[in-house]
Amino acid sequence: MEENELIVSPWPHIRSEVSVSKIMWSVVFALIPATFAGIYIFGYKALEVVLLCTSTALISEALALKVMGKDITIISDGSAVLTGLLLGLNLPPGSPWWISVTGSVVAIAIGKQVYGGLGFNPFNPALVARVFLLISFPVEMTRWELPHPILSGVDAVSGATPLGALQMGRLTGKGLGDAANLNLMDAFIGNIGGSIGEISAAALLLGAIYLLYKGYITWHIPVSMIAAVFIFSGIFWVIDPARYASPSFHILTGGLILGAFYMATDMVTSPITTKGQLMFGIGCGLLTIIIRMWGGYPEGVSFSILLMNALTPLIDKYVRPSHFGAKKDAAGTI
Amino acid sequence: MVGLDNADKKVTDFLGGIHPPYEKRDTEGLRIEKAPLPERVIVPLSQHIGSPCSPVVKVGDHVRKGDKIGETSGVVSSPVHASVSGRVTAIAPFPHPNGRDVLSIVIESDGKDEWGDGPPERKDYLRLDPGLLKEIILEAGIVGLGGAAFPTYVKLNPPKGKKIDTIILNGAECEPYLTADHRIMAERPHEVVEGLRILMKILGVDKGYIGVEENKPDAILNLKKAASNGSATGVQVKKLPAKYPQGGEKQLIKAILNREVPSGGLPMDLGVLVQNVGTAMMVYRAARFGRPLIERVITITGKGIKRPRNLEVRIGTRISEVIKECGGFSGVPGKVIIGGPMMGMAQYTLDVPVVKGTTGIIVLPKDSIVFEEDRACIRCGMCVKVCPMGLIPNMISIYSELKQFDDAVQYRPFDCIECGCCAYVCPSKRPLVQLIRHLKSELSTKRSMAG
């Protein structure tokens, strides 16, 4: 054998099998139950939204890479598919086609590629697009449908989401308003109005368990975010349950479960240390409830995560892991 | 024996670390065998950390086994000896496992394998004067055999004001594939324990530990037997969790003593001296039999080796000959690594010799090697979780890429032990260790120029 055929490369010579694309595709895989739940509850129109978002995101990514002269095969890493899918799951089920297309282009081009691509974006791309759409096209982005499962024969009827009903009650001085009638089991299974992918807590948790098991997300951000929502909303509920919704209402409605497990956990835009991740999660939870209780929008998950994304560099600057040898031989005994 | 077992319970887990596939099964049960006499040896004049030796023989000279052929040239240095008897045929630069060409002495064996006139055998080695024992260790050319090859003699002379009160033998062997230390501890526990006692005697220390990962039960058992024999007091065998890098000096001290070497400090700041188990064996052989370090045990393994073995090989034997002794390659070799797969060096030629710091030769077949393009950091934080030093490797690597070397100082790059845990887990397949090393060397250059 020829000696010059030996491969010389730097150590370590063995590496774990985890890769960026494995992580991205696993998150896509974990979102399948929630995607199916959304399509089942809201019909084929929801499928159209999801497919349009995903394909537009992929095409935008390819174009962006081409324009910047980068390797185009990187689109196979699953990150663009994931961004498109997440955006689709964050849209109202009856969104017109141009909402999906505009949103996906914004997510990839402005949310991610202008910063230099995956790894350099400070904000979660799908959330950048969702908030962009919400501010620019408030009518289309708040036209919700009540559940009308496939094969049930029920037609799409517009109606308020539980959080929308809650805000209406607050603004009209009727306390909880229609939100008081929410069946929590319906909210857990997904038999409520809302964005395509956020309605079924059960389906979202199924995927989240898979991601936790694989180690692609850790409990720190979702648990601290949900715990903050639970405690903060619980304090107000204990004081005046006629005016404030219960903690379980806040946890099971809106985009909290989707946001906590799939968006706030985005590696690129959340802190790298576990201590920082706990702070990040608590911040997301508090801001969510502040916006839901006193803000101009009924839902605050997207805004809260984006705001905490902005704080991530600061958290990472000041929160450091405990460092070996930092103490001057504290134990000192054998 | 009962009393010794209790000692297992007080072991502290260190922070971070990884569990790579251990791949030790092929060789962990194989007895150490003597490799046949090589026809030719290439003995580099620099096999240790410190200044290289200067040759004390000329081309054409006849040397006998154990004769000193390279003399120390500075305070931190270590002599080298002829590992076969024969004729010096060249003194010239030859490829070294570190990747550079190093001035080396080539000896063609005369096949007689005769010993030269070395120091005498000494049955009363434990009663010798510490100064004489240190002299024996220096003259025997003993360096750390765990891979770093730091001269043992230097470690035995701590600067004034530093008092060593504890000696730890490193038998963790946490690198995957390698089993040489495992076999030494299982087959020659007496020599290891006696070596430790000599080191304890030299430094007047009464506490000695041998730390072994729990995946070597036979080694632990045999060492315990040897340690409880006769007058061997003060020697404790500690069973450690099997986790990489358990054999890192600082991690080992943390595990056994639950004390942390301060940032920027050395084990001696805690009064601790760490030596590899193979080094202790060599200390014993030097003191007891007057034998210099001319051979060592290495593991030759990997899917690319036909017959994996643990061999006792003469220093200077070319690895091509060693591989031949193991049945040659199995399939097409892709990488030939000297050392472990986590921190070893991939070789470009099979002409490099086995040196004092060589712990093993691992051959990975070509079809098993996956080449993965590295990409941008996605800030997943996996490197932070596994770093045994509690660093943020991804930030240091990014500063290194951006050439903002000074800005990285706040992330304590000099605490990095280069174990490779971060690169092992990195999903972006970034060359984190090399980026950090680059940054460290840039900063060091800057500092030495400023100073």
Image (cartoon, coloured by chain):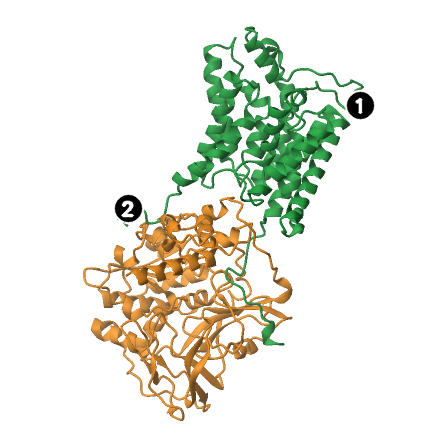
Chain colours: A green, B orange
Q: Position of residue A133 (x, y in %)?
A: 63, 27
Callout 1, which amino acid? Leu
Q: Position of residue B316 (x, y in %)?
A: 44, 79
Residue depicted at x 44% and y 81%: B93
Q: Position of residue A134 (x, y in %)?
A: 61, 25
Q: Is residue B385 visible?
A: yes
Residue depicted at x 59% and y 22%: A252
* Precedes in sequence: disc 1 or disc 2: 1
Callout 2, which amino acid? Ala
Q: Chain of mark 1?
A: A
Left or right for B212, reference A163: left
**Residue at the front extreme of this rendering:** A67
Picture quadrant of residue B120: bottom left
Q: Chain of mark 2?
A: A
**Vertical relation: B7 (above or below) B285:** above
> Mark 1 against mark 2, which lies toward the viewer?
1
**Circle 2 residue:** A331
Left or right for B159, reference A264: left
Image quadrant holding the N terminus of chain B, namely bottom left
Residue A151 badge: 1
Left or right for A314, reference B152: right
Image quadrant holding the C terminus of chain B, namely bottom left
